[in-house]
Image (spheres, helix red, strand yellow):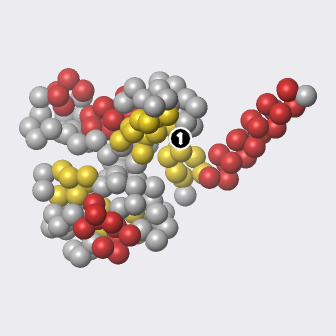
Amino acid sequence: MREILVDLTKCLGCKTCELVCATAHSKEKQFFSAIFEEPKPVRRIFVEANGPTNFPLMCRQCEDAPCVMACMSGALTKDELSEEVVLNSQRCVGCFMCVMVCPFGVMTKNQHKAAKCDRCAEIGYPQCVLACPTKALSFAEIPTYAKKERQKYLTNFLVRE
């Protein structure tokens, strides 16, 4: 399964990912139109800052997925093939139990219903990843990403010697 991964050393906290996310989930899918839409489009990624550290956070697709277990209407399910947590907003009753149990605080409200990162399923690729100006976000398989990081570390280690 591919994950949206973050390189903290590259994130500037510019919130471009938040703007692009909201635009990608708007009616018109255009930034300037989205600004005037009612209701306002809702972002599904959140950039948190703590001094010099910025961290974009979105649904982490938890293996045990407390949001799925807490969802009384069955709106949140775990896809057996992709292992992604999927939200069917047609089934959501707006109880927000998922919001209360999410360990990362990334479930949000969209017109009396829950909303979460869907990795831009309708578009086919997470728009936050494409829009990040510093490439702090990537969409990769964990083993592939880990191998790249090990190689980067090794290269840096050898250069220092």
Q: Secondary structure at mark 1?
A: strand
Residue sitting at the far front: 51
Q: Visible in this render: residue 121?
A: no
Can see residue 6? Answer: yes
Considering depth in this image, is 80 or 142 the residue closer to the camera?
142
Task: State which quadrant residue 68 falls in.
Answer: bottom left
Q: Which x, y percent locates residue 152?
A: 74, 35
Q: Quarter of the image containing the N terminus?
A: bottom right
| Residue 72 left/right relative to 3 | left
Q: Nearer the viewer, residue 9 or 20?
A: 9
Which amino acid does the dot numbered 1 rest on? Val
Residue drawn at 70 percent across, 41 percent down: 149
Relative vertical location of residue 72 with respect to residue 103 in this rendering, above or below:
below
Residue 124 against residue 88 in the figure, above or below:
above
Location of residue 84 (image quadrant): bottom left
Q: Residue furthest left?
A: 38
Q: Residue at x 13, y 51 (%)?
A: 111
User: Can you identify the residue that label 1 sits on?
Assistant: 6
